[in-house]
Image (cartoon, rainbow, N blue to C red):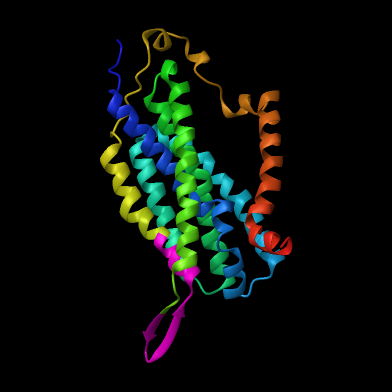
Amino acid sequence: MMQATLSASRRATYITVAALCMVATFPGRTHGLGFITESVLQDLSIDRTLYSYYNLVATLAGALFCIPIGAWLDRIGCRKTLSIVLALLGVSVLAMSAVQSKALFFVCLLLTRGFGQSALSVASITLISKYFPKSKLGPAMGIYSVLTSAFFVGAFGGMGAALEHLQPCTLMWRSDEIIVPVWRMAWGGIGVILLAFFVPLVLLCVRRRHVLPVAEAEQARPLEEAGVSFAQAIRTPVFWIFGLSIAFYGMVSSGIALHNEDILLERG
């Protein structure tokens, strides 16, 4: 039996929500962290090399968060998975904006990388594949990619404006003055936005159950054609071609993006 398809307005909503969720990975990405690198180094007195190692370990360990997220998406659905991951990411970002020690900063960095760059990225892309038939998946992913790029440009601009125009805040605690640096205010603001905007957005706009609007021909195809196991996937040459090429690009771009401010200053 053919299942009902989404209306045009619902398809547009799902693509937009998925693109926004990908942009919500901003604080867990190297390009996002690059905005606050110099401020963090100064505020927490972290050596630049140590900070780079922190990010290396957090990125590699955080990638492990991708492994269970697939099972979550299949068992509890996109709506709950996205809501939980966004909430955990928001709490992690808020915690990072308040830490005072290097050890706690690393823990928050690991969680931010894991929930943001890893888990949320997987959940965002899956939201498209779960709700669109194969015949509409290509155009949907194309629009999703364009929207994601546009939203990221907005996120970069917004973060840059916040760091440029905000002023350090002074708080009183037991007759002591505590100066809150700009980077902490901007970073904490991202955490608040994740919790106050993105979590409700997903709860309101994403259906509880997957529609899976596939055509009859796709429903009738043999089960073995629908996918392969993890063990089978890693034995294919294409897995390693894509994996290694993406890893090499990521290695180069991450090193540049994380310390982009220092590199640009050095180059004048």
Is residue 203 among what the camera can see?
Answer: yes
Q: Residue at x 34, y 30 (%)?
A: 12
Q: Is residue 157 above or below residue 148?
A: below
Residue at 40% of width from left, 27% of height from top? 130
Examine the image and state in which quarter residue 82 appears. top left
Quadrant for residue 210, please give it.
Answer: top left
Give me the residue at 40% from left, 42% from top.
20
Whether residue 96 appears in this view of the structure is no
**In front: 31, or 211?**
31
Residue 88 drawn at (x, y percent):
41, 53
Name the quadrant of the C terminus.
bottom right
Indicate yes or no whether the magenta region holds residue 197.
no
Residue stretch in magenta? 170-189
Q: Count the marks: how many?
A: 0
Residue in view at x 48 percent, y 71 percent: 182
Q: Position of residue 34 (x, y in %)?
A: 59, 58
Instruction: Where is residue 85? Give x, y as percent.
Output: 41, 47
